[in-house]
Amino acid sequence: MNMSETLGRWRATILDGGRLSLDGGAMFGSVPRVVWERCIQPDQEHRIPMVTRLLLLEDSESDRVVLIDAGIGDKESSEFRDRFAVTLPQGTGEAPLRRAVRNVGVDPDLVTDLILTHLHFDHVGGATVLDSSGQSVALFPAATHWVQQSNWETGLSPNVREKASYLRQNIEPLEATALEKIDGSGEIMPGISVERVDGHTQGMQTVRIEGGGRVMRYLADLAPTWHHLRAAWTMGYDICAITVVEEKQRMLQAALEEQALLVLEHDSVHAITSVEERDGRIVARKP
Ligand SMILES: [Zn+2]
């Protein structure tokens, strides 16, 4: 069953962009293992199961079909895929991201825009494919690709700490597309705005969709799983934990006020949730 919500002119559909497993300790940062393993059970290699959940937005008032994030894609070696236990969207015969779109009944040729929350490999890898000569090229060469300017710069010259997450072959080919480098927060299409946050990495953007009196927020790595909606639960991967805490507190307050639907990109169980106030604290509803 496809999970779709209507927000005014936009129809938002959740996409299965594939699966991966990442080290539980790295995902939960300073949270002690005895605490986080009660939330998500790790495998024998101490990894926890995750998904790459994408969002497709279809505009009923124009031809616009917008994808948010792209999953991992299939350019990497089998060693790489084994390390992260990668599985790709169902189907054969075309690139994983095209299959993900087709699997919800939409023709991938109709995609006009790709909003990339940031250029870490599990968010952008699917936006490129290897051509017959083994060169990495854009999967949707005619689509407009939206990324924060500061993240673009970080992605092309990453610090040592993040080097393993920013792969050149995922990034450079996008230069040849219609590339919109955004500087900060704001509306980029009617009802769709991005909000820049810098705690997870320099220049990540979350996406806010508003229409018909409803709001949906795509949180990317600001809160990758339901458990990370606790403001203090940051990741080992975050470049600045305190910034993440502040950015998350701001987001949670806004999400409470607007009763936003919150899309969780990496939670293998919960796709969408919302928050409520309990004993003076903002907490995520049990989905
Ligand atoms: Zn990330």
Image (cartoon, grey):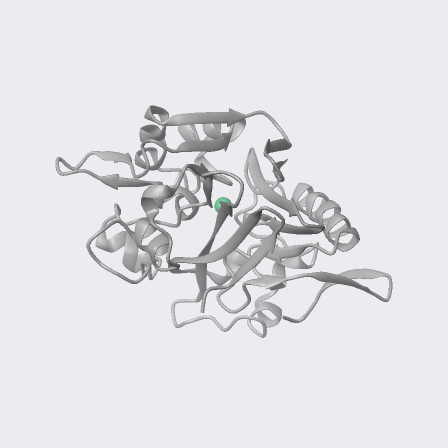
Q: Within the image, what quadrant is residue 259 found in? A: bottom right
Residue 270 or residue 160, whichever sits in front: 270
Could you tell me residue 128's position as x and y percent?
A: 30, 39
Residue 222 or residue 139, whichever sits in front: 139
Q: Quadrant of the N terminus?
A: bottom left
Residue 243 or residue 275, whichever sits in front: 275
Q: Quadrant of the C terminus?
A: bottom right
Q: Within the image, what quadrant is residue 63 found in? A: top left
Could you tell me residue 54's position as x and y percent?
A: 46, 52
Q: Residue at x 63, y 56 (%)?
A: 262
Q: Is residue 208 visible?
A: yes
Residue 28 or residue 34, whichever sits in front: 28
Q: Residue at x 65, y 47 (%)?
A: 211
Q: Residue at x 36, y 55 (%)?
A: 100
Q: Residue at x 58, y 25 (%)?
A: 183
**Horizontal side, residue 250 vs residue 182: left or right:** right
Could you tell me residue 281's position as x and y percent?
A: 81, 61
